[in-house]
Structures are given as C-alpha cells and as structure tokens.
Amino acid sequence: GNLCRCTGYQGIVAAALDAAKRLKTGKGPSA
C-alpha cells in the first residue's frame, strides 16, 4: 500500500504542477 500511495501522490503532484504551469504561461488547451 505504501508504494501505491507514493506513486499516486507523485502523479497528483505532477498533474498539479503541470496545470499550474499551463495557467501561469497561459498556453495549453483551455478546459
């Protein structure tokens, strides 16, 4: 369970950072 939680958390963080980057740059697909 520890590994699953870790990878899941990493995925969430990566997605959040990517979304923040898109919002900051103003580029990327508009949802």
Image (cartoon, rainbow, N blue to C red):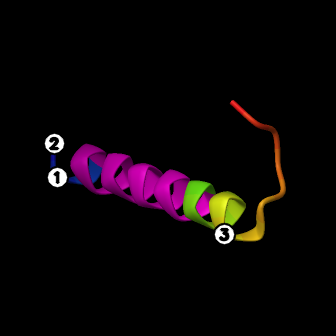
Q: Quadrant of residue 9?
A: bottom left
Q: Quadrant of the C terminus?
A: top right
Neighbour tally class for label 1: few under 14, some 14-19, many 20 plus, Cα within 10 Å: few
Question: How far is the residue under mark 3 from the one under mark 2?
Answer: 34 Å
The answer to whether residue 5 is above or below residue 26 is: above
Q: Position of residue 16 (x, y in %)?
A: 48, 56
Is 28 contained in the magenta span? no
Q: Residue at x 42, y 60 (%)?
A: 13
Q: Position of residue 28 (x, y in %)?
A: 82, 49
Q: Give the residue at mark 2.
A: 1
Looking at numbered disc 3 in the image, what kind of residue is underneath it?
A: Lys
Q: Give the residue at mark 3.
A: 24
Q: Quadrant of residue 30?
A: top right
Could you say whether the residue bearing mark 3 is in a helix, strand or loop?
Answer: helix
Q: Residue at x 53, y 52 (%)?
A: 15
Name the one closer to the observer, 1 or 20. 20
Q: Which residues are magenta?
A: 4-18
Name the one closer to the observer, 19 or 26. 26
Neighbour tally class for label 3: few under 14, some 14-19, many 20 plus, Cα within 10 Å: few
The answer to whether residue 4 is above or below residue 10 is: above
Looking at numbered disc 1 in the image, what kind of residue is underneath it?
A: Asn
Q: Give the residue at mark 1.
A: 2
Looking at numbered disc 2 in the image, what kind of residue is underneath it?
A: Gly
Mark 3 and mark 1 residues within 8 Å of each other at the beta carbon: no
Q: Choose the circle earlier in sequence order: 3 or 1.
A: 1
Question: How far is the residue under mark 3 from the one under mark 1?
Answer: 33 Å
Name the one closer to the observer, 8 or 19. 19
Taking the view exactly as shown, the residue that stands out farthest to the left is 1
Q: Position of residue 10 (x, y in %)?
A: 40, 59
Given this view, does label 3 or label 2 mark the residue nearer the observer? 3
Mark 1 and mark 2 residues within 8 Å of each other at the beta carbon: yes
Q: Position of residue 17 (x, y in %)?
A: 53, 65
